[in-house]
Each structure stands twice: as structure tokens, then as C-alpha cells.
Amino acid sequence: MSSSTAASGHHPIAEVAPLSLCAREPRVPADRLVAEMVPPPRFQAARFDTYIPDPNQPSQTAAIGALSGFAAGLGGAHASGAGKRRWFQKKAAAPTGPRGIYLDGGYGVGKTHLLASLWHATPAAPEQKAFGTFVELTNLVGALGFQQTVRTLGGHRLLCIDEFELDDPGDTVLVSSLLSKLVGEGVALAATSNTLPGKLGEGRFAATDFMREIQGLSAHFKALRIDGEDYRHRGLPEAPAPYSEEQVTKAAYATDGASLDDFPHLLEHLSKVHPSRYGALTDGLGAVCLTDVTPVPDQSTALRLVVLADRLYDREVPVLASGVPFDRLFSEEMLNGGYRKKYFRAISRLTALARDAKGLVGE
């Protein structure tokens, strides 16, 4: 049944019940983790010329020019000379100077769009470029092992890391060590990051802090500042209010590929699924319908929900919900704590997906 039926206000019960996220327990093989290191569906069409800079923020226009030049500089042979050396030739020296670029800006200024645009603009075959979140990169190391990950990514021309997480010192050291090895192999790097615990700036993480945390790797990065407000709310109406449980349920039955879950049960289920599998958890969904949305009870649960929100946003899956509004998911203590940027990003993205879901419910 098409979503147009739902939009008309008539919601006949479908012959097949909606899907349930709680019934899914995906298993993701390591080779899929590698193959899926490309920009997510939401950013498959992202290009520099589709990024709409805020006219009041000249740094956004400047970022397009700087990244375009960075991409152009990655053309030609692999920087280490891989693929062109003969057995009797010495390996070319690793490039000197910055070999990476760090996009420094708040949530919603389009950093992921620009990062994906860089990936698309880099003149190399898709199998020579990789794009993933920090979590996806650490999961890859866990699946393949450190040395195999270096061998797998070492022949790439570019590695883009979205949402570089600096919350866990162990993971930061692990990935910094990995990136140092990859830079030595001639791989160019591009990254965005989130906030360190205790860094309570206005939704942004300072480049100086990023450089300090990655320590010896910082010499390989040039910071590119991008100012601006969250584009998802720039000139847009307020997020739609939650719907009734009956409306959400009817929409779930009337929408192809929709899932229907009780929110507290979904949060419990997420605790049993590794976050690396949340992308697979959402495979093939046409919409996510949630009933009884309530504030999350603790920080561990909240951080899992952030990852799910990211994967739904990447895949452009609309979210229809009953219960409390999305801006009340996280407590004041959480929003004032060290992970505040993650929570505000989740609210922003879920709000955007709630707008996308308005057409599933009749007037």
C-alpha cells in the first residue's frame, strides 16, 4: 500500500503487520564493514555544488574552495607510489606537511555533506576511498585486527572519518596509531569530530583540543573552520508535535516497509545489539513508528539512541512517534554534560526525520 493512502487520511489495516526493530538481530560480516565504507544514502548525491552556504557565514563558502583544492591535490598516483614501483625500486618517502584536513564546526553546519563531497570529488576509484564514522572504523579494527586493517586501507588514496570520537582515550589512541600508519602509507585523511567530556562550548569542539587529543597525529592535519547555525532549523518551522498512539499505529500498518515498536522496549533491545549493527538493524525500512516515547533513563541508553538516530538520518528513514517531543528525550543534566553535542545532534536529526514523516498521517 502506498504512502499516498496514508496521506489521504484512510488507514486500512494491511494484510501484513508492520516490521519490528525489536525482532531484528542482525549479524554483520567483516567484508560488509569494508564494502560499506562509502558515504551513507543521505549523502550519496552530496557534492560541493549542492552545498548551500549561509550567505552570512563566509567561512562556509571558503570551505568549499579549500576542500575542492584538497581533492584536486589527491589526483594522480597514490602518494606512497604504491602500484607503480618495481621490485628493485625503493618505496617513495612519505609526503611531508599536512596530509589531512579537519573540519571544525558545530552540529548542523554541513560538515558531513562537505566530507561526503570531498569523497566524491577525489579523483580515485571508489575502492580507493573510504568513508565512515569513528565508531565504524573502530568496529573494522575489531573485526579485522589492527595489522589487517592497515593492509586493507593502506592502498587507499583517502580516508574520511565522520564524528571522530574523543570520549574514550583508549579508542582515541588506537585510531591515532592506525591513522599514523596509514599516513605513512600515503593515505590522505579528512575528519570531523565531536565534543570531549566537559567541553561545553556552543555545540562545537575547538580544533586546538582536537589536535591535542590526537597528539603526534596533529601535524598531519590542517584545521578548516566552518561557522554557522544548524541548517536543519534554518528558516524551517518548528518540529511537528507527537501524534497519538492510534495515529502512529494506523500509519505503520498503512506504510510499506514501516516498523512499529514500543519505545521503551526498543531501548531495551538496543542494549542487546552492538552499535556497529545499527545500520543493518535499519536495512530496508520505509519508516520507523514509535509509540510511548519517554525520556531516556540513563546515559548509556542515551548514547545508544544517538547512534540509532545517526543511522536513521543517514538512511533518510522518517520517524513517526507518540509520547513526548524529541526535544525532551534527554534530561537537563545530560544536555549540560560532556556529551551534550551528541544529544543536540540526535535531537536535531530526529526532528528533521519527524518532519519527513508528516506525510504518513492524514490531517
Image (cartoon, rainbow, N blue to C red):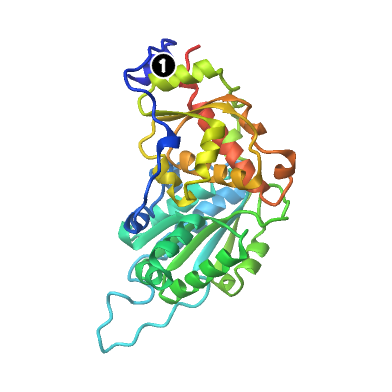
Residue 54, position as x, y percentages in the image:
58, 41
On the image, the x and y values in percent for residue 19 come to 39, 30
Q: Which residue is mark 1?
A: 6
| Few, some or many residues within 10 Å of mark 1 (<14, 14–19, 20+) | many
> Does residue 208 appear left or right of residue 20 in this picture?
right
Please tell me which residue is depicted at 47% across the width and 20% down the height of the picture: 249
Q: Is residue 332 left or right of residue 36?
A: right
Counting from the top left corner in percent of width and height, residue 162 is at: 51, 54
Q: Nearer the viewer, residue 229 or 205?
A: 205
Residue at the (64%, 61%) spot, across then down: 207
Picture coordinates of residue 312 (x, y %)? 47, 39
Q: Which image quarter: residue 229?
A: top right
Looking at the image, is 103 positioned above or below residue 296? below
The amino acid type of the residue labelled 1 equals Ala
The answer to whether residue 52 of the structure is visible from this angle is: no
SS at mark 1 in the image: helix
The residue at the point 57 percent across, 69 percent down is 173
- Dividing the picture into quadrants, the one containing residue 155 is bottom left
